[in-house]
Image (cartoon, rainbow, N blue to C red):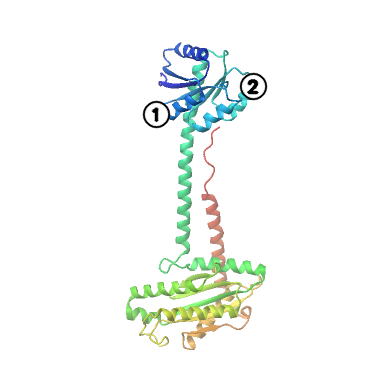
Amino acid sequence: MHPAHLNILMIDDDEQDVAIIQELLSVNHDFPVDLLHCPSLTTGIELLESDTDIDIVLLDLCIPGTVGLDLFRQVNQSFPSIPLIILSGNTNEAIALKAMQEGAQDYLVKGRFTSSRLRRAIQYAVERQGLLLELDAKNRTLQSLSEQLEVANQRLEALATIDGLTQVNNRRSFDETFLSEWNRLCRENHPLSLIMCDVDHFKAYNDTYGHQAGDECLQRVAQAIAKVAKRPADCVARYGGEEFAMILPNTDLDGASQVAEAVRNAIRALEIPHEGSSSGQGQVSVSLGVASQVPDENVAPSILIEAADRALYVAKQQGRDRVQTHQKDCSSLESRRTLELVGRLQQALNQQKAKRRVKLRLRPGALFTSK
């Protein structure tokens, strides 16, 4: 198989050396080349910047005005995709090694190589450069795919934690966030508050206005609650159906009660008509239960959820459209639901850990490297 035709640029100010290279390259007619010559760096760079197709550069290091490898570095940095072979009268092995380490394809000492040695050096240089360019293209493709994978993972994670209808956190996200904040505040000995919020007489709303209107109502309610939760650490979630929850880290009972009242007023300010409501004066309203606890490793996290749920139940029993707080110590609660809630929260923690492991496995790995 005959090699492809090559355009070779020789940058050298010695006409005799150029003639020698021309003669060495013309010995074998099966090695078709065109040797272009530039006597200075300036003319060489001008040619490389032109439309002329150059496959490889033979570069003399002894052109006046340059020191050591400066000439090589300048050409290599300006045209990194073109392979370079250094031709030099300097036999210093340290310079040759340095040039190869910095990207020269070969280092040939003038007067010490044959025609076949020169041809092999040129062929191998072109082939190696082609492989490097191919490798670089594959790395860029892999990097692009890795970035796309990262974006896809982020979208999947969002889909897994966001409620599709209301665009606030879903139940799974609530479980994970609640348990995470409980454990964190258990170490810091700071209070954690929880608000359970239920849209009053929502079944009657659906029966009166239809399910599409009901969905729109839940969307507006969710966004109104989310606007009240202004701190980054606060978490608003759709707990189920027409019920929402707010996790308020580093917040005591009085602070959480104020937030709950702000939520109630925000929902009333929406002025969503509700003829079937006996508690909202003809408008959509919400009932809220509030509980707070300084997390303790000896207390089940589910106790706080149950306390807020009980407060919500009392708010409904007392006429709805109101905020009810759970004033007792949550740790004194005893219920059959405790084991069930603890199990569900532990499952959420396990899912959170598994998700982190999967994310680590899917993290973009090392790119292709040349040997």
353, above or below 263, in the image: above
201, above or below 82, in the image: below
Could you say which quadrant of the image residue 33 lies in?
A: top left
Res 334 seen here: no
Res 329 seen here: yes
Residue at figure coordinates x 54%, y 57% from the top left: 354
Secondary structure found at label 1: loop
Q: Position of residue 269 (x, y in %)?
A: 43, 80
Residue that numbered label 1 is attached to: 51
Residue that numbered label 2 is attached to: 93
Disc 1 packing (10 Å; few <14; some 14–19; many ≥20): few
- Circle 1: residue type: Asp
Q: Is residue 320 left or right of residue 343?
A: left
Label 1 with label 2: CB-CB less than 8 Å: no
Q: What is the CA distance from the residue labelled 1 to the residue labelled 2?
A: 36 Å
Could you say which quadrant of the image residue 298 lies in?
A: bottom right
Residue at figure coordinates x 53%, y 12% from the top left: 114
Q: Position of residue 347 (x, y in %)?
A: 54, 65
Foreground of the two, 264 or 175: 264
Q: Which of label 1 and label 2 is nearer to you?
A: 1
Q: Position of residue 301 (x, y in %)?
A: 60, 72
- Circle 2: residue type: Glu
| Quadrant into which the N terminus falls | top left
Foreground of the two, 182 or 49: 49
